Amino acid sequence: MNSEPELLRCAVIEDEDQMRRWLCDRLREFPEVEIIGEAASVDSAFHLLNRERPDALFLDVKLIGGSAFDLLNRLRANRVPIPAIVIITGDDEHAIPFINQWHGEVVRYLTKPFIEEWQNKIRDCIDALCAATSRFAASLPQPPLTNPARSYLFVRNADQDIRIDFDAIRWLEVAGGGAVYVVSDRQTIRLNQTLNQLLEHMPPYIMRISRDTAVNLNRIMRVDRSDRGVFIDCNGTEKFLGVGDAYYPALLHHLDLIK
């Protein structure tokens, strides 16, 4: 007998009513998500999470009656399980200390406003939350063409099918007009694909670091914290690529650089 697929049970904790309603409405557009409740204050959020025990949490740093720090410390003190978290904030300076302290629970980071390209941003958050939630991780479908036996991708470009070896990629860069430059060890190829389309078929170590750029994490030589960028090895020289503010904490987390 076929059973219905399990849904990712999410709670949204956000003190701004309009933003909270907007985010709940957007999350409901994803069929694998169930909104089990929402709250604006530390007290109401604590009672919601204690009662419902969600799988995932979209959590603003600033809340009525306190902060995300207060909420999570209260949950921990009362031995209430803390789910996987997506942090929401309009101020990076408040988010970074939170991520530093709770980096084991935080899987993604959203900077307000994130209405532009919201589908891709929320899709990325949901995928990360599912991967971080043990009862979903084992049942997640393999992304297309990225199973352990496949280390490459063929991309149709005009009248040719071009092979891209994942390990050889250095970085991807938007070329404009719906095209992307793929910079690899052997060559630079201009493909008539968007960055989002290509990243859907790439392994997790090919990671977006800005709106227009993604890098192979295995090719990063140095991280420049002052200028917020990374240096990629490029035939004996180093190529600097800037990292967007919204992507910077996630990059440090993936490189195990948050202390």
Image (cartoon, rainbow, N blue to C red):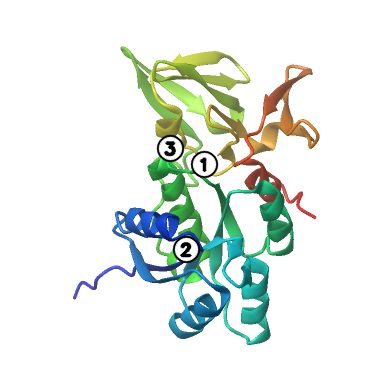
Q: Badge 3, how many Cα within 10 Å: few under 14, some, many 20+?
A: few
Quote the CA–CA distance across marks 2 and 1: 16 Å
Quote the CA–CA distance across marks 1 and 3: 25 Å
Mark 1 or mark 3: whose residue is earlier in sequence: 3
Residue 137: image tag? 2
Q: In percent of the image, x 81 and y 34: which residue is there?
A: 226
Q: Which amino acid is tagged 2?
A: Ala
SS class, disc 3: loop
| 230 vs 41: above or below | above
State yes or no: discs 2 and 1 in contact (Cβ < 8 Å): no
Q: Which amino acid is tagged 3?
A: Glu
Image position, residue 45 (x, y; %): 51, 75
State yes or no: discs 3 and 2 in contact (Cβ < 8 Å): no
Residue 91: image tag? none
SS class, disc 1: loop
| 129 vs 178: above or below | below
Residue that numbered label 3 is attached to: 116
Q: Which amino acid is tagged 1?
A: Pro
Instruction: Name the residue at the left extreme.
Output: 1
Q: In percent of the image, x 68 and y 84: which residue is there?
A: 77
Residue that numbered label 1 is attached to: 203
SS class, disc 2: helix
